[in-house]
Amino acid sequence: MSRATSRKSRAAVRQAPAYPMRQVLLASVAAAAMIAIMPKFADAQHAGAATPNAEVKAPAQEMLGQPSADPVVAAIGRAITANAIENELDGDFGPGVVLAARQAYARKVFQPVWTEAGVAAFRAELKDHFRQGVVIDELDLQDVDRLTFSRFEGEPAARAQADIGLTASFVRLANAVSGGLKDEGGADTAEDDAPNRAVLTNAIVEAGKGAVASAIDELEPDHPQYAALKRALREYRQIKSDGGWLAIPDGGLVRPGDRDPRIPALRNRLEIEGYDTSGRMLLTQSADSPAGGIGGLDQSVIPDGKLASLQNDGAPTDRPDIYDPGLVAALKEFQRRHGLEDDGVLGPNTLSALNESVTSKIDRIVENMHRWRKQGDMGTRYVWANIPSFTAEGWNDGQREISMRTIVGLPSRETPVFSDEIEFVVPNPRWYAPVSIVRRDKLPKLANDPGYANRNNYQVFDRQTEERVNPYHVDWNDPASARKYKLVQMPGDQNALGRIKIMFPTQYSVYMHGTPGKHLFDKAERTFSSGCVRLEDPVGMASWLARYDGRLDAGEIREKVESRERKWMKVGRETPVHITYFTVTVGDDGQINFWRDVYNKGDGIEHVKKFAPLYTPPPASKTPSDGTPASRT
């Protein structure tokens, strides 16, 4: 679905501004006639048509049969016929984008697009264009200031040229925040999802009136994740404005209940980013709380020998350097949201994530907003598998309806990023081991013990004759055997694809499937496959697909899986599948997740340079020689 049919801007485009009827009629005539006569004006002006002294009328005069009373309007018409818009855009955009800008002037019957309110709003937007996470080299605020002055002061020709220059600057901003203005004349395809010509024309006109911020917002991607990242960008910019956080010094491992001089710094660091370290999240109202509980807190996070130093509210009695349950719970939440093992231990990986600077996190949010712009429209109903978060989700009409953990390719065998459409669901699949995997993984095992094939339910076939071959009759030490023989794993509990696979044939030979290695889903970082996406619940995903498919039936899928019968089941309604690489995502609860850059795609991490001071306990009070306790002041 394109933006023209999927987002709220569609309604805004359909609702024409409340112009007087004559003006609407003239604008409609102008818009239609301008396209037809533009080449004639250009030829007349640049090729010397008629006589050398021939006067070229402005479009408004030619189309409406009357001279323009406003010299700026006439100058705009002459400038447009002289390809001023094309010249201002400097060939960076195709004819469709140029035509959208022309149609903005045609709609206004060649009156200036930019009012004083519009220019003021545009300048304000440029000063804060980073709210959309864009850095625009082409837009220089000083240049816009110059155009602003020329727009309202000086000769008509200069004022006209300045107005067109402001429009070109707005088009460049629109191009940056939308991810690219495509050149199609109508609604773009789902793969492109760029604003169509009508939307861009309307945005130019509305921006010129002063509604720059809303016009720009309408051009942004409409995926919920993009909107959530935009909110996160605002929040983290505020954290940066407030001073950010300090780094936590290096040191040994800190386990729940330990004392460490870095604990106050850890508490402060987490609280600045919004984590609750008070222990409230651990409170329970359950009547069957463990006997001897500390204020209803979960004691499992604290070793038995270290409970005595804690009060009933879970906080240390008089030592802020104790790693108490509330802080442990907060650190576990931080670990989960950063792709780390949530063991509550302050170790080197967790410390590195904690010491990432707020500027670095802002940069990562911005980079992922940019990736969403390039991603394009994902469709109304689709499967989204994101590599760094190790998740696969089923989305419908803007809502996440199913989610599960995944296992993706090793760093040496990366899962590729692409979009396609699901075509088949195959219960009890066979696995045809690719030649590359046979060569790398299977030949050494078979050379050492040909019985490996039978024990793991493999059958060996001659690729030329398709006849089955006894694995003991093959020279597995010969590297050529990887191509000469085909290794096929039969359906069953040992099958590398598990009990079901979901097919979307591509050049990558990558698809989604189950796995017999269920224990691997308990790992935080799950890069174990040879490129395919292993699903924690492939039958659940197939059943979700069947919910909206006229041909697939969830009951039949489960029946075939249980029967051990292999069957290729064609989907009746092909569903888009998107395999992406977003290192920052936002959950349904609004919490932002910063995933590890498992393939080193370039999400460079920068750390805070300034360290927080270590906690120093106050000196112990001295007791007078007569045994009387010292007084406290």
Image (cartoon, helix red, strand yellow):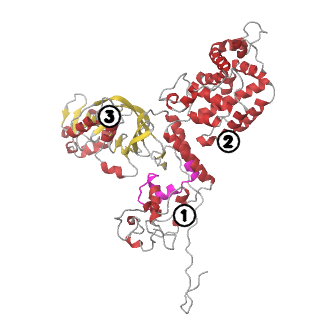
Is 345 one of the magenta-colored residues? yes
Mark 1 or 3: in front is 3
Residue extent of the magenta highlight: 334-363
Could you tell me which secondary element the residue under label 1 belongs to? helix
Mark 3 or 2: in front is 3
- Residue highlighted by disc 3: 546
* Tag 1 near tag 3, CB within 8 Å: no
Residue 127: assigned label:
2
Whole-percent x, y for residue 454 in the image: 19, 42
Q: Earlier in the sequence, mark 1 or mark 3?
A: 1
- Residue highlighted by disc 1: 265
Image quadrant containing the C terminus: bottom right
Whole-percent x, y for residue 562 in the image: 22, 40
Q: Measuring 51% from the left and 69% from the top, which residue is drawn there?
A: 321
Quarter occupied by residue 174: top right
Q: Measuring 19% from the left and 35% from the top, which residue is drawn there?
A: 469
Q: Measuring 19% from the left and 30% from the top, which residue is drawn there?
A: 467
Could you tell me which secondary element the residue under label 3 belongs to? helix
Crowding at mark 1 (Cα within 10 Å: few <14, some 14-19, many 20+): many
Left-right relation of 621 to 119: left
Instruction: Determine the CA span between mark 3 and mark 2.
Output: 49 Å
Q: Is residue 626 above or below residue 436?
A: below
Whole-percent x, y for residue 475 in the image: 23, 39
Could you tell me which secondary element the residue under label 2 belongs to? helix
